[in-house]
Amino acid sequence: MTDEVPLHLAVALDGAGWHPAAWRATDARPGELFTAVYWADLVTEAERGLLDFVTFEDALGLQSAAFHLPDDRTDQVRGSLDAVLLAARLAPLTTHIGLVPTTNVTHTEPFHLAIGIATLDHASKGRAGWRPQISARAADAAHFGRRSTPQLTDDDVRDSELIAGRLRPLFDEAIDVVEVVRRLWDSWEDDAEIRDAAAGRFIDRDKLHHIDFEGAYFSVRGPSITPRPPQGQPLVTSLAHASTPYDFAARGSDVVYVTPHDRVGAEVTLAQVDDAVEGAGRNVRDRPLRKFADLLVFLDEEPGAAARRKAHLDDLDGAALSSDAEIFAGTPGDLADLMLDWRTAGLDGFRLRPGALPHDLVAITRGLAPELRRRGVFRTAYDTTTLRGHLRLQRPNNRYARTR
């Protein structure tokens, strides 16, 4: 490793891969998508490559070829496991890699979200993260029957700023959700548990706190039922494409994933993120925001092989792959060149979406990661045991302990 700040590297895991026809690849494992062993193999492979963390996708409705509407297609993967429960199952099978599930915050109570992620942090001994996600599809609300959400149009989804504006109330609510979750994580002080059997005192009740949150969308009294997580605050991450989600990230996230399509685009996007951070009044010295770029990748050592493999999957699906993120098909060396070029825009790391699993994950861990090590920009071993430690983020103080 050089004296340069290390490059951070994460992988976004989703079903058989991010290409909708990936389940039909010759080395895919479609019969195992809903088994623990399949996911255990993927995550242990990611840890073997010394990656910072993995993320798990989740949703409240079946996957769809359209962003805003359900469909009746039967030629693509449909169905998924609960991301938080899956991450908890994988926690004892790993020792270093961070585990970051996605959860919906539009139709889920903040209290349940808080204790679920706190429990994951305890189960993983400090390796939990969280990606709060709003419910952008109106059809998802029908699963709960409590509220309705805006029905997006085709015009909406063609413009990232327009769609973010339509969904602004859901993002405002999500900001409150994150704030409540963070307060609940702090509602137990670190030394609230006494566990003195002889004296008959298990907890110090003065070190459990009502958070007494009152907002426009809900009120939560607290305290949590789960002691403060090992990291104090598990990492909050978010995906952002436009000004409204940039603002959400600036207010509540520790890591933001952005989706530029070239280095110049990365510079423009990061400038917008920095403006949002300044507008939120965030002290980046005390609360830095790590910035990752998402890339959807197909990797093979032989030049041209990845592009041919992607083209074959496109033919199987009947359409060329499209994505919010840049799509890369090439060699690990070529991808390393791109990443180091984009890094100069101010990125801290990358979250890679493997086009097909397990093929492209193995290419990341056994091709790309060694290439980055040879260039002196990626770790040769884990030197910390928590996700905050991997990203060089301090364990925060408890807000209630400071004021008491």
Image (cartoon, helix red, strand yellow):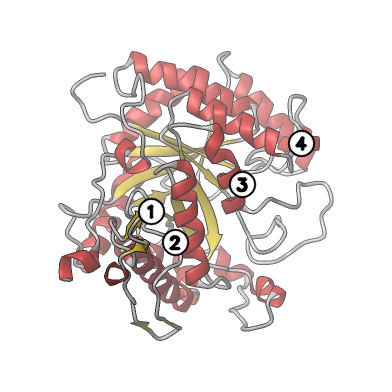
- The single residue placed furthest to the front in the displayed view is 198
Q: Is residue 355 left or right of residue 91?
A: right
The answer to which of 72 and 144 lies nearer the viewer is 144
Q: Quadrant of residue 59?
A: bottom right
- Label number found at residue 226: 2
Identify residue type, mark 3: Leu
Separation of marks 1 and 3 at Cα, in angstroms: 19 Å
Image quarter hosting the N terminus: top left
Q: Residues within 10 Å of mark 4 (few under 14, many from 20)?
A: few
Q: Which mark is residue 60?
A: none
Residue hosting label 1: 229
Q: Evaluate whether residue 160 shows in this view.
A: no
Q: Position of residue 97 (x, y in %)?
A: 45, 34
Badge 2 marks a residue whose secondary structure is: loop
Q: Residue 353: x and y, percent? A: 54, 39
**Image quarter in which the C terminus is found:** bottom left
- Mark 4 lies on residue: 32
Residue at horizontal 77 percent and vertical 61 percent from the top:
71
Whether tag 1 and tag 2 are in contact, CB under 8 A, the answer is yes
Label 4 amino acid? Glu
